[in-house]
Image (spheres, rainbow, N blue to C red):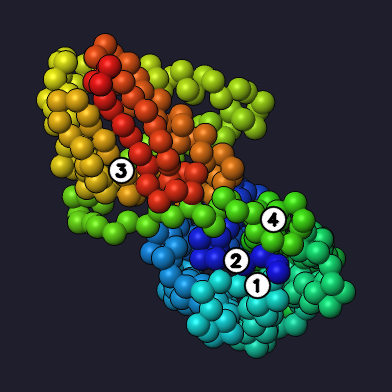
Amino acid sequence: MGFQLTSGDYVLFLGRAARKIAENGDYISALDAATGDGDHWANINMGFEHLLAAADEMRAMPIHGVFKKIGMLMMSKIGGSSGILYGGAYMAASKKCADKEALSSEELCLALEAMVKDMMNRGKAEPGMKTMIDALYPAVEAYKAALAEGKSDRETMALVKRAAVDGAEATRQMEAVKGRASYQVNKGVGHLDPGAVTMSYQIECLCDHIAENLSEDDNTHSKGETTMIKNTPSKTNDRTELLRSAIEHRATWMGLLIDEAKKKGLDTSFAHEAVLRCGMFHGQNKFPRTDDLEEFARAFATEDVVNAFEMEILNSDDKHLHIDFHYCPLVSAWLKVGLPVEDIPELCEIAMDGDRGIIKTYDKFTFELGDTIAKGNDVCQIRIDKAGE
């Protein structure tokens, strides 16, 4: 049995693609300035920002619902022809996989095929016309061929990715038939089509996400990987969302900072030490100096914090403060920006060094972290006890 692409997977792919598109803004804008009106990156980037804002909502939907939501958002939020083409394509994919909770490899191929057919029909375009289709069409054809030949999932993803990248590169020598480039003397020859490039980015990110989450036998999804993270809020109000937004903002720059450090070969011990120091500072300056665990609990688990993390207070007395968190805004932020899934448990450990630092300033208290949402569990377990109890 091959992989199953879930809504959680697709949301993570969107975060990954959004990040790649955002990081290449200057490059894409320069490509578009040479052959178009220079606004392709701004439009597609804005569209993905709206998709990320709806990430938590989409993660709780079946996959066909995710595609429909993406289609509606892209059609309404992306300017120019791209919004109509992407929106229509995702609506077509939603219909193709109606009632599906998740997609097999064969079903994903059919969904992508529905997308490219809709783009071709809606845009009255064919491969070779120097458009985004020149990245998607060869990718779909490669996917179909790989399935027919019985290639492994890992081989299939590599072939699909290569076809998309090569397809985008091939637009360099194509003459534009549509758009502003078609009015240029050289028909845009010598320049890559920006729409094909951003399409290749998305296919590349999708294939990489799937490949990285395959088990060693190349054919099944690894247990305990991305799809196992369950982190959907069940309670909300304006005040809670405001606090969650602030927590997500903090988690985003923390996660990206650590990600950049790792790319440069730095050890993450600096982050553990810095967050621990931050926690100790807060313990000394923002929490009551007391040996009374009940007094501490009132400052640690305020009503706002309880709501933001959907805390369940299992035990709170003079000896024990035991809490289960049913939602984590930090994990939500890391998933939204597409940070490597395998890094999220460590990011959680780093973040929890803040709480460890707080408790470190209390001689009479001990701290223990049990299960975590970041590791695929239903809850995060925090246990604060009086020493010796």
Residue closer to the observer: 144 or 252: 144
According to the picture, the residue beneath numbered tag 2 turns out to be 5
Residue 104, label in figure: 1
Q: Earlier in the sequence, mark 4 or mark 1?
A: 1
Q: What residue type is labelled 3?
A: Asp
Secondary structure type for disc 4: loop
Vertical relation: 98 (above or below) 311: below
Counting residues from the start of the chain, the first of labels 3 and 2 encountered is 2
3D distance between C-alphas at marks 3 and 4: 31 Å
Between 320 and 15, the one nearer to me in the picture:
320
Residue hosting label 4: 214
Crowd tier of the residue under label 2, counting other residues whose Cα lies within 10 Å: few below 14, some 14–19, many 20 or above = some
**Distance of mark 4 from mark 1, alpha carbons?**
13 Å
Single out the mark in the foreground, 3 or 4.
Answer: 3
Kindly indicate whether the residue at mark 2 contacts the one at mark 3 (C-beta within 8 angstroms). Answer: no
Q: Give coordinates of residue 372: x percent, y percent.
A: 43, 41
- Residue 379 location (% of width, % of height): 37, 47
Q: Residues within 10 Å of mark 3 (few under 14, many from 20)?
A: many
The amino acid beneath tag 1 is: Ser
Q: Mark 3 points at which residue?
A: 324
> In the image, is residue 347 above or below residue 25?
above
State the CA–CA distance, disc 1 to disc 3.
Answer: 34 Å
